[in-house]
Image (cartoon, grey):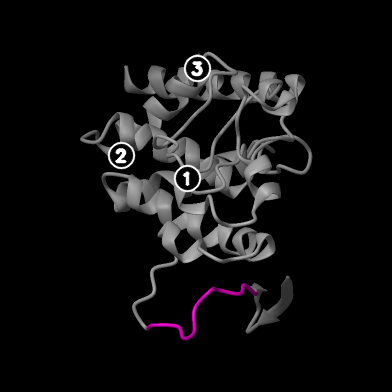
Amino acid sequence: PVVKFKMQGHKVDLLFCRLGLWSIPEDLDLATDNVLINCDEKSILSLNGYRVAERIRRLVPDQNKFRELLRIVKYWAKIRGLYSNVVGYLGGVNWAVLVARVCQMYPNAALSVLLRRFFMVWAQWEWPKPVLLCKMPAYSLFVSTPLEQVFKMQWNPLTSVRAKQAFMPLITPVFPCLNSTHNVSKSTLRVLTEEFTKAFRILNDAAG
């Protein structure tokens, strides 16, 4: 459930979720999986956006570099017409996963190097090899919870035809681990790869 409104010129999505708690502690950590115990399916999905963003933030080695690189990449994507998951390209979460993975791969690199490596990595990536920021854990935590539909959403190319057929799987790092790029097609993936390659060549030439 979501309420959409504007507050002082800013767009706000106010999500509702029902937690299995008698009271809400001040130090409640929504990023931990324990918070999902006794939650219903809709509440888990309502929490998903925050949990994904927070988990990504915790998985990168340098949050300042991650934020700066993400800001630059998003600006580039918007200029190149690639910032839209509705038409088969990538949205905010997708770009965050790609940026976070490069930050993990090169934890000590300067921002300028990270930018060049970002385009190099994704221009050369062997799709549909999935991009994961962490190992997908086993969820014995939820065995006693009636969440069959949520489990079915979990990305698993061994049991799901849709997961197996994904062109550019970027997997979110919290339960349920989802492919966040299900709208990417063969043609839009080709365009993305071409744009990554073009940007890498420009930066590489500039670096000498």
Mark 2 = which residue?
111
10 Å crowding of disc 1: few (<14), some (14-19), many (20+): few
**Compared with residue 72, is residue 51 higher up or lower down, i.e. above or below?**
below
The residue mark sitting in front, 3 or 1, is 1
- Mark closer to the chain start, 2 or 3: 2
* Residue 75 location (% of width, % of height): 55, 46
The answer to which image quadrant residue 2 occupies is bottom right
- Mark closer to the chain start, 3 or 1: 3
* Residue 124 location (% of width, % of height): 49, 14
What's the CA distance linking mark 3 and mark 1? Answer: 29 Å
Mark 2: which secondary structure? Answer: helix
Residue depicted at x 49% and y 44%: 96
10 Å crowding of disc 2: few (<14), some (14-19), many (20+): some
**Residue 8 appears in the picture as rendered:** yes
Identify residue type, mark 1: Tyr
In this rendering, position of residue 131 left or right of residue 117 = right
**Compared with residue 123, is residue 31 higher up or lower down, i.e. above or below?**
below
Which image quadrant: the C terminus?
A: top left
The answer to which image quadrant residue 100 occupies is top left
In this rendering, position of residue 10 left or right of residue 72 = right
Identify residue type, mark 3: Trp
Mark 1: which secondary structure? Answer: loop
- Mark closer to the chain start, 1 or 2: 2
Mark 3 = which residue?
125
In this rendering, position of residue 33 left or right of residue 92 = left
The verdict on residue 200 being magenta is: no
Which image quadrant: the N terminus?
A: bottom right
